[in-house]
Image (cartoon, rainbow, N blue to C red):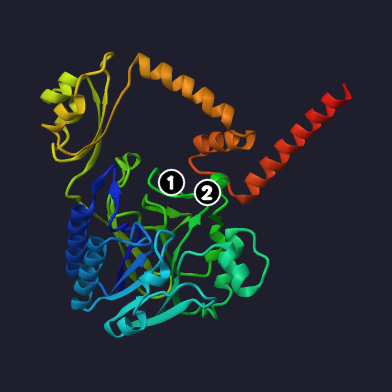
Amino acid sequence: MKFLHLADLHLGKRVNDFSMIEDQEFILNQILEIAENEKIDATVIAGDVYDKSTPNEQAVSLLDSFLVSLSNLKIKVFLIAGNHDSAERLSFGCRLMEASGLHISKAYDGKIETTALEDDYGKINFYLLPFIKPAHIRSIFNKETETYTEAVNEALKQINLNKNERNVLITHQFVTGSSKCDSEDFSVGGSDNVDSWVFDDFDYVALGHIHSPQKIGRETLRYSGTPLKYSFSECNHKKSACLVEMNEKGNIKINLIPLKPLHDMREIKGKFSDILTGKEAGVKNSSIEDYLHITLTDENDIPDALARLRLVYPRIMKLDYDNERTRNSLSAQMTVSLQKKSPVEIFSDFFETQNGNSMNENQYNFINNLINSILAKDEHSSSVE
């Protein structure tokens, strides 16, 4: 059986006041071509289908068109809500849609919805777990739950899992060890982390939430990433459609099929005159239709720089300067920013810079307690003196 693993479509998203709907329609059509050419059996969409819990009309229409096209190709769809979605709105009419092969998870109520498909090797069970928080578990099971790891583990314990069969979990969480980028939402100190061991019993885990495509430990615990770049921190990302081929149990092949956007996202740095005339090296490697972040290195501000550059590059999303004046200003801002942060927040920033990911719950609590203990001793010493 072959299925596509998608996530984080963020339909209806605006980036720096530019609507991405045209780009999203283009990339979804490209995904449909891949689905048809590869003769896939199913498509998995692991949350953050929309960018907002109340999506606009264009976003709803685009999703409807995409799902109808998949249905016309006789492709099953498994779809869950992410933290950006309203699970209740997204799942409206889900029982009626099941007849068309569209399986949408309802808002989490203590039960994980399951659908089984069959191929030459037997059953493949698809488990749909939308985005959940510890508060959901406390409310539903009346059980004390503090961490996201505890919450997800408790939810998964409700499954009567047959480990002899092939089992696919679709969920939307931030798994410890994943790399983030600027277009994502996450909690300070990594308090929303889920430890990867809770997913050990599943043959494949289709994750959503992180925008960079990546595996977590094993090949089959994976984020598909967004199909498009949604921030300039993603400029170097290689976006793809994740094609999963499940054969007999234990034999899974993964193929990342590159996606080519309608407009790429790039960063260019140089003098105003060089960029305007196309002499800057970064411009030569860029289409004038790309979404651009331009950094000018001129020491003096250029009058009407943005308007003049947009005559040549109409999709400039961001314009700033990097010169002696801005560097001195940034240094002063950083000093003020540090003065406003607590010691544990400063350490959290340092940890993330050094390691590429935030601290997990245990690490955060350890550092927090250690710092509080040191500060308490200092206060005691001062009072004695």
Which residue is at 57% across, 77% downward? 158
Helix, strand or loop at mark 1? loop
Q: Mark 1 and mark 2 in contact (Cβ < 8 Å)? A: no
Determine the image quadrant of residue 30. bottom left
Residue 122 picture location, percent across and down: 38, 83
* Depth check, front residue: 321 or 122: 321
**Residue at the spot of label 1:** 180
Q: In the picture, which quadrant includes the N terminus?
A: bottom left
Q: What amino acid type should be assigned to the residue bearing mark 2?
A: Ser
Closer to us: 62 or 26: 62
At 30% from the left and 86% from the top, the residue drawn is 99
The location of residue 333, given as percent across then percent down, is 47, 24
Amino acid type of the residue tagged 1 in the rendering: Lys
Q: Few, some or many C-alpha atoms within 10 Å of disc 1 (few <14, some 14-19, many ≥20)? A: some
User: Is residue 122 among the parts visible in the rendering?
Assistant: no
If the image is split into quadrants, where does the C terminus sit?
top right
Residue 373 or residue 307, whichever sits in front? 307
Could you tell which of marks 2 and 1 lies nearer the N-terminus?
Answer: 1
The residue drawn where x is 31% and y is 58% is 9
* Dot 2: element: loop
Q: Is residue 152 visible?
A: yes
Q: Is residue 120 above or below residue 329?
A: below
CA gap between label 2 and label 1 equals 12 Å
| Horizontal relation, residue 168 to residue 339: left or right | left
Q: Can you identify the residue that label 2 sits on?
A: 187
**Left or right of residue 209, residue 98 in this image:** left
The image quarter containing residue 121 is bottom left
x, y percent for residue 371: 70, 36
Q: Is 223 placed above or below 119 here?
A: above
